[in-house]
Image (spheres, grey):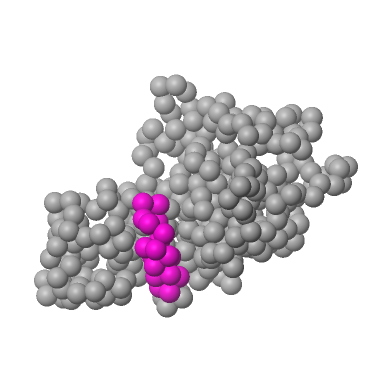
């Protein structure tokens, strides 16, 4: 498979009144053509900031790149001008935002918001713009598309608004779509419909998808590969089956232990991850998870672990993989595909 996106040693920080927040610290990953990559982790781990770096949506300033590279089809994104980014953002790389309620303009009709993305090309007549907008609404499964075209966002349900957001992301026929927790505000039934729609469109259009979520069930259902983020770093990455069957990082195991399976009885207590995330104003010099890890050794607090390669696709940032470390069998290794 050809690599369409290459992120190498990405570091992104924010200057604030309280100091510098080091949100993304040395993140590296590739996205291949036509695959779905999941980024999972708790709130504040840096997954949304990483995704927004790819399309330069983080405000600069106060945000700034401290180092690293983001290459899209061989072109360096971090050094592009605003004009150059306009030809990438929303055209080559689509973005589906977390909350459709606030992402759509409440004062504009749905059809006009879709047409806006075509207008800058100045090659379509008004009638052609309308036809294109209606066809895209039909593509994302919106019934009675002509009527919806004339409606305002407040006249649509939450699921319908999210379909409109997906339509807007597809306008430029992008090679990559970034979906930032696209089902957070939706109920379970609508969530399943939106995820099925995304997967169907990805297969039909051969688009690569970066899916950001905190839901491991969604990851198991949707993704080919997974990046597990914690404290601004990728602590484990691999194929879906690697992450669920052959967990190699205590944080990944903690995430798996903290969710219910079909076998979990209502009397059984879930196992939370004790403690709090690291302070990214002053990140720890060692492993970011050490303070919450029951397997932590002295070295974990003193030095950042290197990336240990388990297989060609599977790697982890954990001192437990060192040849001198004690062998640990994590309590939670499960596959959720049957449950998703």
Residue 300: % across, % down: 74, 34
Q: Residue at x 46, y 75 (%)?
A: 203
Q: Which residue sits furthest front?
A: 267
User: Toward the viewer: 268 or 329?
Assistant: 268
Does 94 sit above or below residue 57?
A: below
Residue 66: % across, % down: 51, 37
User: Toward the viewer: 21 or 4?
Assistant: 21
Q: Residue at x 24, y 53 (%)?
A: 104
Residue 200: % across, % down: 43, 74
Range of the magenta residues? 182-201
Instruction: Mark yes or no: residue 191 visible.
Output: yes
In the image, is 116 to the left or to the right of 323? left
Q: Which residue sits furthest right?
A: 324
Residue 255: % across, % down: 61, 47
Q: Which residue sits furthest bottom?
A: 204
Residue 115 among those drawn in magenta: no
Instruction: Mark yes or no: residue 119 visible.
Output: no
Image quarter in which the N terminus is found = bottom right
């Amino acid at each position: 498979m050809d690599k369409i996106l290459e992120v190498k040693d990405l570091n992104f920080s924010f200057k604030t009144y309280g100091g510098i927040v080091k949100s993304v610290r040395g993140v590296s990953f590739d996205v291949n053509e036509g695959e779905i990559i999941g980024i999972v982790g708790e709130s504040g781990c840096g997954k949304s900031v990483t995704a927004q770096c790819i399309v330069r949506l983080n405000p600069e300033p106060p945000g700034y790149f401290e180092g690293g590279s983001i290459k899209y089809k061989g072109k360096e994104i971090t050094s592009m001008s605003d004009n150059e980014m306009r030809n990438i953002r929303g055209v080559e790389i689509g973005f589906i935002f977390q909350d459709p309620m606030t992402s759509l303009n409440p004062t504009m009709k749905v059809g006009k918001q879709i047409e806006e993305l075509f207008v800058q090309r100045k090659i379509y007549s008004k009638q052609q713009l309308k036809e294109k907008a209606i066809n895209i609404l039909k593509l994302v499964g919106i019934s009675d598309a002509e009527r919806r075209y004339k409606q305002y966002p407040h006249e649509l349900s939450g699921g319908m608004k999210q379909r409109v957001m997906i339509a807007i992301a597809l306008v430029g026929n992008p090679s990559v779509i970034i979906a930032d927790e696209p089902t957070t505000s939706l109920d379970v039934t609508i969530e399943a419909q939106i995820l099925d729609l995304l997967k169907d469109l990805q297969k039909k259009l051969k688009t690569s998808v970066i899916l950001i979520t905190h839901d491991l069930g969604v990851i198991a259902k949707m993704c080919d590969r997974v990046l597990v983020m914690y404290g601004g770093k990728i602590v484990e990455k691999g194929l879906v089956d690697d992450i669920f069957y052959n967990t190699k990082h205590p944080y990944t195991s903690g995430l798996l232990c903290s969710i219910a399976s079909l076998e979990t009885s209502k009397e059984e207590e879930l196992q939370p991850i004790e403690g709090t995330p690291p302070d990214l104003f002053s990140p720890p010099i060692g492993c970011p998870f050490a303070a919450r890890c029951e397997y932590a050794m002295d070295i974990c607090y003193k030095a950042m672990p290197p990336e240990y390669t388990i297989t060609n696709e599977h790697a982890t940032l954990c001192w437990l993989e060192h040849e001198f470390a004690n062998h640990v069998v994590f309590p939670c290794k499960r596959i959720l595909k049957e449950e998703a």
